[in-house]
Amino acid sequence: MADRYLNFTGTAPGRFLTRRLGLPQPAPLRRWSAEHPHFTGQLLHFTAGTSAYRKELSEILSRTGLDVRGSLSGTDTDRPVGVVVDATAVTGLDALAEVHAALHPVVRSVAANGRVIVLGAPPSADDHHQAAVQQGLEGFVRSLGKEIGRGRTVNLVRVAGPVTAAESTLRFLLSPRSAYISGQVLAVGAEAAESTAPDDWEQPLAGRTALITGAARGIGEAVATTLARDGAQVVLLDVPSAEADLAKVAERLGGRALPLDITADDAGERIAAFTADSDGLDVLVHNAGITRDRRLANMPAERWSSVLDVNLASVLGTTDTLLKAGAVRRGGSIVATASIAGIAGNTGQTNYAASKAGIVGLVRSLAPRALAEHGVTVNAVAPGFIETKMTAAVPLFIREAGRRMNSLGQGGLPVDVAETTAWFASPGSGAVNGQVVRVCGQSLLGA
Ligand code: NAD
């Protein structure tokens, strides 16, 4: 369903009227397109404190193709498309003030749809001064995300190990692919899967096989399309009753269809058998999900169990089977689908929120072991309000609230979740593990 309000505010009378009434001014978001895959222009690179990463980071930023500068130059027509502030070495309040000093004079100049990225370090368990200011960066980023407007986003990247491990994350954030991610903390760990930066950042999944559940429509179809764009051979799984739609998606993407109910007892074995001829899988995307909303007092056991079966039990079961069988190759990744409902809770969704919070628990617990034992990363996307058939069916006022109650003032698109999945799945993201990243435009729910 089209966002008529967003279209209206894009017209001159619409802008005039909504401004006069003090209504939200969502900016059209720039997303990836084959014609315009990258941002171009100036990128400001500042350092707070004395960071050991300065030179390496500058090289990484230059590889994005942006014109990296240490200070603002040019005219108003040449606004920077991004600002990166390296605050990894910030251990006290003086250095924290340098973050303010760096951004205060330039923040207004950042182009519409531009990016502000603060690089931080994990808060220390031994140094409470460092922990205080590093945690302070989170509050700073989340607040700036709420006030910056014009489709601009603000995120914190916490780097625990070598800064080179953050290249895929920085490239993702500094591209139109991350349009609907704002106010988030993305952690790049010290431990990495045995994967290397891709030879070709435009085709990072070349030679890799990805299986996506729930791929006949909606977000799953978008994930399959995006992973195929990035070079993956895709295997598309959905319920047998969706076989016709599934076949169409498979044909369009040159992939293979696997009609299968993911709650079947032998689903894991069947996936392993189906993908054995490609020597297994590199990317496993648990996207299939259902809702059966009712307040708890009115929720029969069947509504509870059907949601838990599809959204959580099948993810636990197939993941265990496939990892045990060695069906997910080393250097591969598992991406599950949570939801902001699993973080914030939602009326009528005790079943759904329990299943999605369960995904968060699964990811956090399994990720370190899956990396140590199988060389596989485990992460989750947590979508907010995404424009799909599911959300088009939501009553008008609740739908409008879902769309507007976030910093970007609009709903996300399935492709926003897909791009985030592709970033997790990239072999360059081997140090991104155990993360739950919200793709929600900085939704107020559960923020
Ligand atoms: P959708 O209903 O459009 O698509 C879900 C797909 O999963 C369908 O093709 C369906 O046939 C398939 N599926 C359902 N049960 C299955 C089973 N037992 N076996 C195999 N396939 C099965 O939903 P969507 O909006 O695209 O959502 C995709 C995922 O994102 C879900 O996990 C959902 O909970 C999550 N999510 C969506 C939103 C949103 O705003 N749309 C927000 C947060 C989370």
Image (cartoon, rainbow, N blue to C red):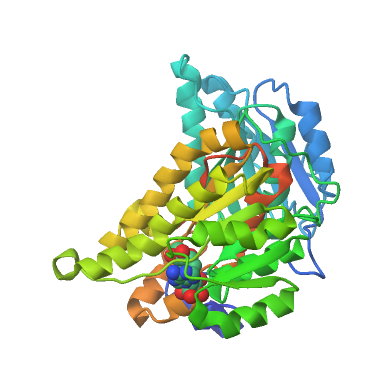
**Residue at 43% of width from left, 45% of height from top?**
362
**With 70 as the anchor, is 257 left or right in this view?**
left
**Residue at 65% of width from left, 42% of height from top?**
105
Q: Is residue 420 visible?
A: no
- Vertical arrangement, residue 315 with respect to residue 18, above or below: above
- Vertical arrangement, residue 211 with respect to residue 378, above or below: below
Residue 43 in picture, x, y percent from top left: 77, 46
Residue 354 in picture, x, y percent from top left: 31, 55
Q: Is residue 229 visible?
A: yes
**With 206 as the anchor, is 246 left or right in this view?**
left
* Residue 26, quarter of picture: bottom right
**With 284 as the anchor, is 386 left or right in this view?**
left
Of 412 and 224, the residue lying toward us = 224
Residue extending farthest to the left is 297
**Residue at 80% of width from left, 34% of height from top?**
58
Of 94 and 268, the residue lying toward us = 268
- Vertical arrangement, residue 192 with respect to residue 439, above or below: above
Residue 123 in picture, x, y percent from top left: 50, 25
Residue 447 in picture, x, y percent from top left: 40, 50
**Residue at 49% of width from left, 75% of height from top?**
239
* Residue 128, quarter of picture: top left
- Vertical arrangement, residue 162 with respect to residue 282, above or below: above
Of 43 and 422, the residue lying toward us = 422
User: How many numbered callouts?
Assistant: 0
**With 193 as the anchor, is 324 left or right in this view?**
left
